[in-house]
Structure formats: structure tokens, C-alpha cells
Image (cartoon, grey):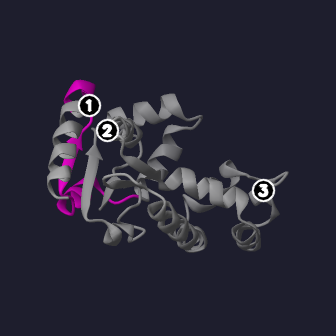
Amino acid sequence: MIVGITGGIGSGKTTVLKMFQKFGIDCYIADVEAKFIMNSSVIVKTKIIASFGEESYIDGALNRRYLASQVFANEKKLELLNSIVHPEVAKHFDEFVKHSNSEYIIYESAILFESKTFKKCDFIITVTAPIDIRIERILKRDNTTKIDVLNRMKNQISDEKKIEKSDFVIQNIDLIETEKNVEEIHTKLLSFL
């Protein structure tokens, strides 16, 4: 069983994932794996350099800041990058599933719906938090500006649309409440096995 977790940037998806991992659930973090693939796959590197220029890599390592400046303000360039990376992430995830012994698997992605990966999921959980809290979290966590954060948020579909398509919603403001929600959802998911 595949359970998708999504939510806007800064909603606390990683925090929620760690709570599921405490129950021994295998979690695939699409963003982390995509970065790994962008740094390790010769095919992906070649396509990114051909599409975005030599500046995309510095000494063989992905130049995230440069690439972000190229794609987050330009929808067409973002689509192009996604068309290079997403098929490779999908293949990588299929391998991950084959080697998992977990009762179910969590696939975490901020762009679960945008990438159409939600179609692989049996259930979907959306993690939400008020926008001001999300911005505050991102500014603390990342070396970025409020304008960059808002640009990234603009490229993600709204929480309302995500919630409409989800089976479960976790309002991630209070950690104790969030933990209770995760435990309840985990118990429900086990009942479907």
C-alpha cells in the first residue's frame, strides 16, 4: 500500500514523516531522492546542462541556487526540469518499493498532485499550517528571502485543492496534536491491510 504525503513548503511534512518512521514505516522523500539523482545520474546531469547551461553544476555538484533562480520564476522552465527529473525519480521509487518490507510505504512530495504521482497512491495525507507560520519556518530553516519563499509557494497548488483530493488532513501547528493525528491515521491505515 502506498500512502502519499503532501503539503505546501514549510507545512512540516518532514516532522510528520519522522513520526510515521517511529512506527517502522519506510518513507521515500521525493525531493531528497531527486537531489541525489540530479547529482549522481549522468543522464540527468547531461540533460540539465543542455537545458539550463554549464552553471547548473559547480565542480560536478548541482548548483541549486542557480537552478532555483531559473525555474521558480518561470513555469515553462520548471516544467522542463520536472520532465527531466520526475521519470528518473519514478523509476527509483519503484526500486525502493521492491526492496521494502514495511507494512505500507509513504511517498512524500510537495508536488504530489502537480507531478501526477498521486495516481500511484492508495491514500493521501495533506499536511497544512497557516501561511505565516510556514513562511517563518522556511526563513528559519533555509538561507532564503521572503520573496523566494512566496515564489516557491506560487508554484504549488493551494492547500484547499490538496485537501479536496486527500483522505486525511493533518493541521501541523501543535506537535502533541500532530503526533496524536499521526497515530490515529497509522492505526486506520493498518486496518486497511
**Quadrant holding the C terminus:** bottom left
The residue under label 2 is: 23
**Which x, y percent locates residue 127?**
28, 45
Residue type indicated by callout 1: Ile
Please state the horizontal and vertical placement of residue 106, each as a whole percent of the image. Answer: 36, 53
Residue range (magenta): 156-177
Tell me where residue 27 appears, x and y as whole percent: 42, 49
* Label number found at residue 19: none
Can you tell which mark lies on residue 57? 3
Q: Mark 1 highlights which residue?
A: 173
**Residue 67 vs residue 30: left or right?**
right
- Image coordinates of residue 94 in percent, x first then y, are 48, 68
Disc 1 element: loop
Looking at the rendered structure, the secondary structure element under dot 2 is loop
State yes or no: discs 2 and 1 in contact (Cβ < 8 Å): no
Could you tell which of marks 3 and 2 lies nearer the N-terminus?
A: 2
Measured Cα–Cα span from mark 1 to mark 3: 37 Å
Q: Residue at x 33, y 57 (%)?
A: 4
